[in-house]
Amino acid sequence: MGSATTQALAATTATLDAVSGVDIDVAGELFAAARALGGSSALSGALADSAASPASRTKVVTDVFGPALKPETVALLSAAVVQRWSRAADLIDAIEELAVRATAIADPDADIEGDLFRFSRTVAENGDLELALGMRMGETSAKGALVASLLEGRAAASSILIASSLVQQPRERRVRSLLDWAMHLVADQRGRTVATVVSAAPLSEAQATRLATALSARYGTAVMLNTVIDPSVVGGLRVQIADDVIDASISTRLADLRQRLAG
């Protein structure tokens, strides 16, 4: 990510705090706007063209999106296009990020992080599904409809919006990577981080609470746990937060012991 894009993204996401009335409709419209830009290199290029004045870029937003979208959506799009982006693709990414964060704001009580994590696991365990969602051929809207049908009744509407929207515009990104990216954005918007915990058996409520409390103290932020049951770890836990891995599993200890004995 170029330095211009880094600064532009920070300024763009900050506008979410300044725009009132951000709801699920606004989030959906932002996703739709990102798809529109992704489908038109002329439009995305015009809106990311730093040689054009901010006023002219804002006018394009108003002319193209103003008649169809809510004022809050147009305000957020306008805030994005006046920034300086390294590439047109970075602007599209930023609007998608706005959409994900707007969804988190619109539905604060939904377990979006958990829903996205569970769906990512479903995709990982089903090669045919991952292939169907990741292939370049086929109608993008059909992919969104497939995800919506799979998650209906199993996930919050806000979670379905994010997952079904992202699969319609992967742009060379793997579906699981997109879901993981969105999960961490939602957590960040809510002022917390996500830990993936691998254990041989489900954690009790008391165990989960103690672990979350310990991790929160260590990382200085609220921590949400996503648990994966894997009997191969035998006992203990393996915890991953971002790039940090805390491996206290018995299987790893046994492997270390075997290596020492063999060495």
Image (spheres, rainbow, N blue to C red):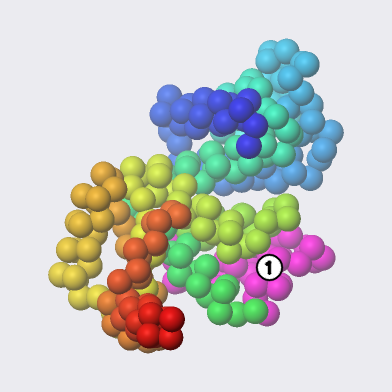
Q: Quadrant of the C terminus?
A: bottom left
User: Which one is in front, 228 or 16?
Assistant: 228
Residue drawn at point x = 60 percent, y = 80 percent: 126
197 is higher (above) or lower (below) than 97: below
Residue drawn at point x = 65 percent, y = 32 percent: 2
Most extreme residue toward the front is 263
Is disc 1 surrounded by few (<14), some (14 to 19) or many (20+) residues within 10 Å? many
Q: Which residue is mark 1?
A: 133
Q: Quadrant of the N terminus?
A: top right
Q: Is residue 70 magenta?
A: no
Task: Please provide percent x and percent y for residue 148.
Answer: 57, 66
Q: Quadrant of residue 42?
A: top right
Task: Please provide percent x and percent y for residue 168.
Answer: 68, 57
Extent of the magenta region: 128-157
- 95 horizontally vs 16: left or right: right
Which amino acid, by three-letter code, is at mark 1?
Leu
User: Which one is in front, 223 or 263?
Assistant: 263
Residue drawn at point x = 51 percent, y = 58 percent: 180
